[in-house]
Amino acid sequence: MLLSKSIICLAMGLLPSVFAASTKRIDKTKAALLVVDHQVGLFQLVHDINQVEYVNNIVAHAALGPLFGIPTILTTSAETGPNGPLPKEIIDLHPNSTLVKRHGEVNAWDNEEFRAAVRATNKSQIILAGITTDVCTAFLSLSLIEEGYEVFANADASGTFNKAIAEDANDRMRAAGVQVLSFFAVTLDLMRDWRSSPGAAEVIPFFDKSVKFNSELMKIPG
Ligand SMILES: *[C@@H]1O[C@H](CO)[C@@H](O)[C@H](O)[C@H]1NC(C)=O
Ligand SMILES: *[C@@H]1O[C@H](CO)[C@@H](O)[C@H](O)[C@H]1NC(C)=O
């Protein structure tokens, strides 16, 4: 009896700190965006989401940087090999963003130039997505959590071999305190209020273009 009571107390004492790690909101003034290995030669690995939709999603992910004025770091793995470069649409969105070309490190955090670029943003929150979900996104997310960052994984812009692998990878990240969100949730937490700048005037056309929403159907309050 006593024992069970103390276990309950212990559990309740632990709860707030366990959940605190995964209830943070995105704050565009504190956030940096990472584009991880969205390389043209890797699209063929993605089968948990329709490929046309997926390519739209990764371009939309990269576009969050310029849209919200958040620093963006791009990275590729062995891009002179079969993995290929980032798609031109993403390169064109980021003429001035740092692109770190890794020559061997699987986890981007193992690359010194990449770590330095992330630290140089002086941001505490990281929004990221990559190919594949279970390797590029998950490995980096876990390293970023260890480094003390608040990490938000854009699930729509990470892809992998099948849905079961994606679900396991997302569970693994959540267990470590990563928040796994849809692209829509990431965008609207960055915006927060339709009256913000950027707000309805910029974000609705962005949705029209990126996720083919019909903005006529969206009722904007105020
Ligand atoms: C990139 O930098 C150049 C030179 O500083 C500047 O003219 C241009 O507006 C920048 N482009 C973007 C998209 O920030
Ligand atoms: C880095 O961010 C912290 C917290 O927002 C701020 O106090 C500090 O001045 C920033 N440093 C630089 C070099 O921007």
Image (cartoon, helix red, strand yellow):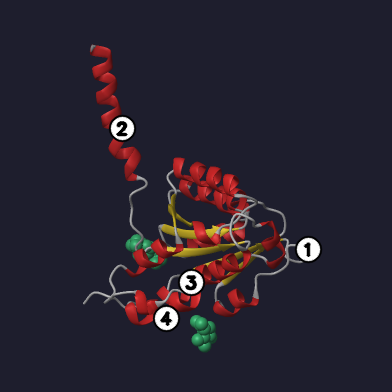
Look at discs 3 and 1 and give the one toward the viewer: 3
* Secondary structure state at the residue bearing disc 4: helix
Residue annotated with mark 2: 14
Residue 197, by quadrant, is bottom left
Structural crowding at the residue carrying mark 3, measured as other residues with C-alpha within 10 Å and reported as few (<14), some (14–19) or many (≥20)? some
Disc 3 from disc 1: Cα separation: 31 Å
* Secondary structure state at the residue bearing disc 3: loop
Q: Which disc is residue 207 wearing?
A: none
Question: Is residue 199 left or right of 125 when viewed as pictured?
Answer: left
Q: Picture coordinates of residue 21 (x, y %)?
A: 36, 45
Disc 3 from disc 4: Cα separation: 10 Å
Residue 136 visible in rendering: yes
Q: Are marks 2 and 4 in contact (CB under 8 Å)?
A: no
Q: Earlier in the sequence, mark 4 or mark 1?
A: 1
Q: Are marks 3 and 4 in contact (CB under 8 Å)?
A: no
Q: Are marks 1 and 2 in contact (CB under 8 Å)?
A: no
In this rendering, the answer to whether 33 lies above or below 66 is: above
Disc 4 from disc 1: Cα separation: 36 Å
Question: Is residue 194 left or right of 71 when viewed as pictured?
Answer: left
Residue occupying image coordinates x 33% and y 78%: 200
Q: Earlier in the sequence, mark 1 or mark 2?
A: 2
Q: Nearer the viewer, residue 173 or 144?
A: 173
Residue type at numbered disc 3: Val
Quadrant where the C terminus sits is bottom left
Q: Residue furthest left?
A: 222
Residue type at numbered disc 2: Leu
* Secondary structure state at the residue bearing disc 2: helix
Residue annotated with mark 4: 205
Q: Which disc is residue 81 wearing?
A: 1
Q: Picture coordinates of residue 174 (x, y %)?
A: 45, 44
Residue annotated with mark 3: 211
